[in-house]
């Protein structure tokens, strides 16, 4: 049995629970695959919830059982022991919890497997999109600079080379979008809920699934609201910016598509804020109306995901 924690320097701290030995390996898929190859018999792996989707998937592919625990649970046990936070300490503490209180962990199952694949593809697609935007900006700037330089006829070749890079990235982006859509269609949250909402495409669906992962890991809908940055909080508020961005794209979609219920709610809230705060600008009214709709939609996602997760669990019993 092994417990694993992510290190700040992009390393994995791996604790052998039976032998009580700690080791460090590079946090790359090839290195983790090499480590798994050294394990002869199927065993249990214990991770914190959140990242590490590639490692969880790889462990499952190799026939191992994967379990996860909330980060706050690790913190509670660390505080109770009076141990300072460190990557090594967390790896050991996760292992100790697995040994003494295995019921604290959630077993990574088939639906979580699909979620992990969506998370990986969603991240790859986002990285490609970022590179694509960056390359297009570079090309625009390059064309401006080349107007000031005499390249003896090589100007078009230089530009063409940049355009080829952009073309390759666009092809990769389209392929990733297609693969992401296929994975999203396999997820119960999509087939039983999201696909019926006009204006919600595979990308928004993937964003919700990838960032929330499991609704049941949140205490209630208010906990998820905090996670998504939907609740105002004094000081530095920690929230998932990617989930908040996904909710923004949701409202843009339902406004454009005039989605039943959600578009009507948006229009009603605009009128409500306009009447209640006549001194507000149109932009502020619009933003508050969008945030209200995003919050209510997030609540709906939470309720539906909880039900779907319970149904999926019941089918395994």
Image (cartoon, grey):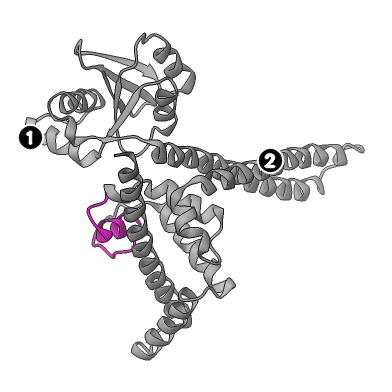
Residue in front for this viewpoint, 132 or 311: 311
Image quarter of residue 109: top left
* Residue at which label 1 appears: 80
Secondary structure predominantly adopted by residues drawn in magenta: loop
Q: Position of residue 145 (x, y in %)?
A: 76, 47
Q: Which residues are magenta?
A: 218-235
Q: Position of residue 223 (x, y in %)?
A: 25, 56
Q: Relative to residue 12, is residue 81 drawn left or right? A: left
Sort mark 1 into few (<14), some (14-19) or many (20+) by Cα contacts within 10 Å. few
Residue in front for this viewpoint, 65 or 225: 65
Look at the picture and state if 275 lies above or below 283: below
Look at the picture and state if 303 lies above or below 19: below
Residue in front for this viewpoint, 257 or 78: 257
Q: In the rendered structure, find residue 169 and report the number of the disc placed on it.
A: 2
Q: Report the quarter where the N terminus lies.
A: top left
Q: Is residue 74 visible?
A: no
Magenta span contains residue 221: yes
């Amino acid at each position: 049995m092994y417990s694993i924690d992510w290190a700040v320097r992009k390393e994995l701290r791996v604790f052998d629970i039976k032998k009580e030995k700690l080791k460090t390996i590079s946090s790359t898929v090839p290195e983790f695959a090499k480590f798994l190859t050294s394990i002869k018999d199927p065993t249990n792996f214990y991770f914190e919830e959140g990242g590490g989707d590639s490692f969880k998937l790889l462990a499952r592919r190799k026939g191992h059982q994967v379990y996860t625990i909330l980060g706050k649970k690790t913190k509670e046990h660390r505080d109770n022991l009076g141990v300072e936070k460190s990557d090594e300490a967390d790896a050991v503490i996760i292992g100790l919890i697995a040994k003494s209180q295995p019921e604290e962990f959630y077993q990574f199952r088939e639906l979580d497997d699909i979620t992990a694949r969506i998370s990986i593809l969603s991240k790859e697609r986002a990285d490609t999109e970022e590179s694509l935007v960056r390359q297009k900006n570079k090309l625009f700037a390059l064309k401006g600079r080349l107007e000031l330089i005499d390249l003896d006829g090589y100007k078009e070749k230089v530009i063409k080379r940049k355009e080829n890079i952009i073309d390759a990235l666009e092809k990769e982006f389209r392929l990733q979008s297609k693969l992401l859509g296929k994975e999203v269609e396999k997820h119960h949250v999509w087939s039983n809920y999201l696909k019926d909402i006009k204006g919600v495409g595979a990308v928004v669906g993937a964003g919700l699934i990838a960032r929330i992962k499991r609704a049941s890991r949140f205490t209630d809908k208010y906990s998820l609201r905090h996670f998504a940055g939907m609740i105002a909080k004094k000081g530095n508020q920690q929230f998932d910016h990617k989930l908040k961005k996904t909710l923004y794209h949701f409202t843009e979609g339902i406004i454009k598509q005039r989605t039943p219920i959600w578009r009507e709610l948006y229009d009603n809230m605009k009128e409500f804020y306009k009447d209640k705060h006549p001194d507000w600008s149109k932009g502020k009214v619009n933003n508050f109306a969008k945030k209200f709709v995003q919050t209510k939609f997030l609540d709906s996602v939470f309720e539906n995901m909880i039900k779907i997760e319970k149904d999926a669990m019941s089918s395994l019993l």
